[in-house]
């Protein structure tokens, strides 16, 4: 067991170093005004995304230990060259944490420690858990097939997948637990970036630590950063683009902005909305702009937009070529123009109807928008953001914006947060998609705390401390409660077994099928069964979102008629919340080898034995 | 008398500036109070643990 943990940690160290190395050449593109450590953080973030894009492109031809290893080797070599060139060795790293920074630093360390331990737990969950439903399913299937193709029974595996390709590298070298453990350094990078933004907006070093502590303890942020969720990674690209973009002046700076905007688009479809907003806010002429030239601004916009499109294009082109639409599933309005695979028009419409319903929040009218800050603070669960965001952004964030409005950088950040929140409000109000705005809210809250101290002295300090302390304690209790079972399972094998049995649906069948060497290809008939738990090749004719994998197979009996053609050796049949058993028990071609109240496994007889 | 005259002649902006810290403090206090009422007193946890106070 401990060897398995060590393997996951080692793979993470390897991928983190490779990401750092791959991103290090970006440093030349960054504005010189950005401090050295902030530049490193931005480069590291960019390197993580570029690693994912590179693996995606190579994976169209071959995704194997060799090809992944080659990409990682190049990255590690680049990291070593950077370290040698910058004379890092012998390392003389001394932590410089003053007394005023101790408490927030300890809070951040505690959250990261919980994340590291919980991240080593085995991934479990049912079909409501996106981690096992698709973020980890894609990498597992791509590694098994040696090729990056959308999994036909799961349309979500066709989403932009820069992060999932990094998970593939982690999974290949570190096993199933490695992607979960990566949260410790991806969240760490996100917090460093937030600290960099806070400092740039005028916070002291202790303020930057408090901003990191506030963000780390926001359950709604944490939810999108662990268990192979990619929302924090996406927010990291958005904020890194803003960090560079709002200080950018020269065209080459805008190349770096384009890279990070492209990586946001290569991580989530929401990046398609965020990227133009970032560019417009970054290029909008400031009050102090003396010689504003429209043609110059347009040139910079085109450079950044061109780089962003080039960076994200592999994902969208692949979808267009293979599935018939660059955005898959396509918006219902585009169905008349496109011929897409695997999904019927009705399935696409139901999918979007579900998304609209899920993203309804408190509505899309003006009143709902005016009350949004209150509802997000006090009723985050109504936006599917369990645990909330704490009180600090509402109580102190506005004061922070008022205090720093004169600072062009902070003003642009506030405008970016407001504009992206408006975009989120009119499209899909899913809490995880707003993590970048939550982080900015925490940064402004810290600035607001400083402001109220300057206004009211000691009383202001106490009020700010109550707000920040209350938010942190409340968030920490929520996070500790949610990750408790994961951490417990690391230290107690008996609890881990209990957790597996409780949280992996149809575990008995999967254990039997995974350990049986005669299983060549498995057929899964129920749409709610998660193929992530199968270590064998499988065919799932009917997907969770109405995907129809085989064109002529519309019913379970159609699927059973194709057993020989599809080279099926075993069938998993279950009674789930979706339907009852689907395989008739008297089928002469099948032998029942496992019979449980809710799950059955059949072995398909050799076709030769059926002939008279 | 002079003092009263001075107050009456105080510009609107100055008066706002004088009360601004108090307003800011009130805003923070109100949000804390609302948080306590909605997220703590209104939570299922509180209702479960202190049902003798709030009723089932």
Image (spheres, rainbow, N blue to C red):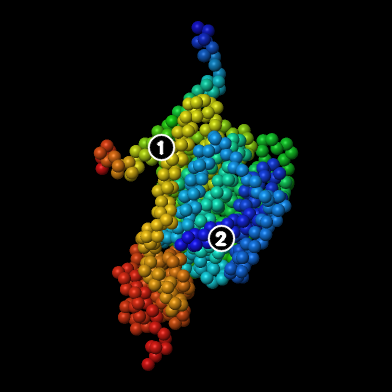
* Residue at mark 1: B35
Secondary structure, mark 2, is helix
In the visual, does B51 lie left or right of A428? left
Tell me which residue sits at (44%, 37%) in the image: A470
Residue A522 percent across, percent down from the top left: 43, 74
Q: Are marks 2 and 1 in contact (CB under 8 Å)?
A: no
Residue A66 found in image quarter: bottom right
Q: What's the mark number on residue A16?
A: none
Residue A309 percent across, percent down from the top left: 64, 57
Residue A181 percent across, percent down from the top left: 51, 56
Secondary structure, mark 1, is helix
Tell me which residue sits at (57%, 36%) in the image: A98
* Residue at mark 2: A11
Residue A553 found in image quarter: bottom left
In the visual, does A90 lie left or right of A187? right
Is residue A219 visible in the rendered image? The answer is yes
């Amino acid at each position: 067991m401990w060897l398995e943990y060590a393997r996951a940690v080692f793979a993470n160290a390897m991928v983190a170093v490779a990401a750092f190395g791959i991103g290090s050449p970006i440093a030349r593109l960054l504005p010189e005004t950005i401090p050295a450590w902030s530049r490193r953080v931005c480069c590291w973030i960019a390197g993580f995304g570029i690693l994912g894009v590179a693996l995606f492109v190579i994976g169209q031809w071959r995704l194997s230990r060799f090809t992944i290893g080659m990409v990682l080797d190049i990255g590690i070599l680049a990291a070593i060259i950077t370290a040698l060139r910058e004379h890092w060795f012998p390392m003389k790293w001394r932590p410089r944490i003053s007394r005023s920074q101790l408490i927030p630093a300890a809070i951040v360390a505690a959250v990261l420690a919980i994340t590291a331990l919980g991240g080593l737990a085995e991934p479990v969950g049912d079909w409501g858990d996106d981690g096992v439903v698709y973020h980890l399913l894609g990498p597992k299937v791509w590694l098994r097939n040696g090729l990056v193709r959308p999994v036909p029974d799961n349309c979500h595996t066709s989403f932009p997948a820069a992060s999932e390709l990094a998970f593939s590298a982690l999974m290949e070298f570190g096993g199933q637990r490695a992607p979960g453990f990566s949260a410790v350094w991806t969240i760490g990078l996100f917090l460093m970036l937030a600290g960099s933004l806070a400092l740039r907006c005028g916070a002291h070093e202790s303020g930057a630590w408090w901003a990191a502590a506030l963000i780390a303890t926001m359950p709604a942020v944490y939810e999108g950063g662990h268990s192979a969720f990619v929302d924090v990674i996406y927010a990291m690209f958005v904020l890194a683009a803003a960090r560079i973009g709002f200080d950018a002046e020269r065209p080459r700076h805008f190349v770096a902005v384009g890279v990070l905007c492209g990586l946001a688009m290569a991580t989530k479809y929401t990046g398609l909305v965020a990227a133009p907003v970032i560019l417009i806010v970054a290029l909008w002429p400031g009050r102090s702009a003396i010689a504003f030239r429209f043609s110059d601004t347009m040139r910079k916009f085109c450079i950044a937009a061109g780089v962003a499109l080039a960076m994200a294009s592999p994902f969208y082109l692949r979808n267009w070529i293979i599935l018939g639409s660059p955005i898959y599933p396509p918006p219902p309005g585009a169905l008349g123009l496109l011929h897409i695979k695997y999904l019927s028009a009705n399935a696409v419409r139901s999918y979007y109807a579900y998304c609209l319903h899920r993203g309804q929040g408190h509505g899309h009218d003006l009143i709902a928008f005016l009350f949004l800050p209150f509802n997000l603070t006090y009723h985050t669960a109504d936006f599917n953001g369990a645990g909330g965001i704490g009180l600090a952004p509402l109580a102190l964030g506005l004061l922070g914006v008022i205090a720093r409005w004169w600072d062009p950088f902070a003003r642009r950040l506030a405008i970016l947060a407001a504009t992206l929140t408006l975009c989120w409000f009119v499209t899909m109000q899913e809490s995880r998609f707003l993590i970048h705005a939550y982080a900015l809210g925490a940064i402004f809250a810290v600035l607001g705390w400083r402001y109220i101290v300057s206004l009211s002295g000691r009383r202001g300090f106490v009020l700010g401390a109550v707000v920040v302390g209350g938010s942190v304690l409340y968030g920490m209790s929520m996070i500790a409660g949610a990750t408790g079972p994961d951490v417990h399972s690391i230290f107690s094998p008996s609890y881990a077994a209990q957790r597996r049995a409780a949280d992996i649906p149809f575990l008995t069948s999967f254990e039997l099928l995974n350990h049986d060497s005669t299983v060549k290809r498995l057929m899964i008939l129920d749409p709610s069964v998660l193929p992530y738990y199968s270590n064998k090749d499988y065919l799932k004719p009917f997907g969770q979102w109405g995907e129809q994998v085989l064109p002529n197979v519309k019913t379970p009996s159609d699927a059973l008629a194709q057993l020989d053609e599809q080279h099926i050796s075993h069938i998993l049949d279950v009674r789930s919340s979706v339907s009852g058993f689907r395989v008739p028990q008297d089928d002469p071609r099948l032998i029942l080898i496992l019979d449980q109240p809710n799950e059955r496994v059949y072995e398909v007889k050799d076709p030769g034995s059926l002939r008279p | 008398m002079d003092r009263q005259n001075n107050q009456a002649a105080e510009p609107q902006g100055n008066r706002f500036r004088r009360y601004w810290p108090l307003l800011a403090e009130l805003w923070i206090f109100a949000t804390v109070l609302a948080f306590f009422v909605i997220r703590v007193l209104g939570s299922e946890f509180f209702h479960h643990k202190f049902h003798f106070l709030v009723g089932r």
